[in-house]
Image (spheres, helix red, strand yellow):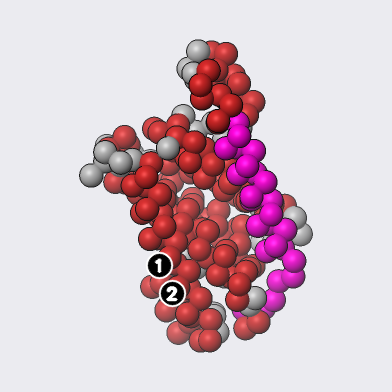
Amino acid sequence: MKYLVEFIGTFFLVFTIGMSVMTPNPAALPPLAIGAALMVMVFAGGHVSGAHYNPAVTLAVFLRGRCSSADIIPYMVAQVVAALAAAGVVLFLKAGQGTPAERDIVKALIAEFLFTFALAYVVLNVATAKGTSGNSFYGLAIGLTVMTGAFAVGPVSGGVFNPAVAVGVTVMGLEAVANIWIYLVADFAGGAVAAIAFKLINPDDK
């Protein structure tokens, strides 16, 4: 399951790079978003895979003697496949962006699902996992995951990642009433899939 961790971490790193840098959101700071994405994914996955998310780092760790010869190729394959998958999603999401009242439903669902998954994945790994028990960084990791998502997909979906927030911003008029179902469906689905991924990665962590 450490290969799944490498896939997830590399995916969100590359996804954030693409979403922040390609036709960037004027309010975003791409280097900050990218650095935050890497940091929170290291917090989330370091206790399982070492959180390389980079074939060059995997090579260095292998040569250092802390990555087995059986792992080096699967790690690199997971990282490259994740990068390709992230690039494909970025190219799809970046193909036109409407106003909040004119959101592309499919793109908004994908964007909300992905970063709600990322948020729940980070929460489960830094705040509930045995491997990170007693840590003092979970608040930082969780908060910066939301910041990263807002930078990366805010223009696509509004960057809600939370059904309660969806209700609040709708009442305040920041989102169209017709869009609220997008957040409810995507955010609950993202949380549920994150729980499944956590259980796959940490089968003995009950």
- Where's residue 80, x and y in %? 64, 38
44 displayed left or right of 132: right
Q: Which residues are magenta?
A: 76-100
| Residue 145 in view in this figure | yes
- Where's residue 194, x and y in %? 41, 54
Label 2 crowd (10 A; few <14 / some 14-19 / many >=20)? many
- Where's residue 135, x and y in %? 32, 37
Residue at 65% across, 76% down: 104
Residue at 68% across, 64% down: 93
Give the label on residue 184, or none.
2
Report which residue position mark 1 lands on.
188
Q: Give the CA distance from mark 2 to mark 1.
A: 6 Å
**On screen, residue 55 above or below 15:** above
**For the residue labelled by badge 1, is the local secondary structure a helix, a strand or a loop?**
helix
Verify whether residue 33 appears in magenta: no
Q: Please state which amino acid type lies under the numbered disc 2.
A: Leu
Number of numbered discs:
2
Label 1 crowd (10 A; few <14 / some 14-19 / many >=20)? some
- Where's residue 127, x and y in %? 32, 46
Do the CB atoms of the residues marked 2 and 1 lie less than 8 Å apart?
yes
Q: Main secondary structure of the magenta part?
A: helix
Residue at 51% across, 25% down: 71
Depth check: give the residue in front, 105 or 21.
105
Verify whether residue 81 appears in magenta: yes
Depth check: give the residue in front, 182 or 162.
182
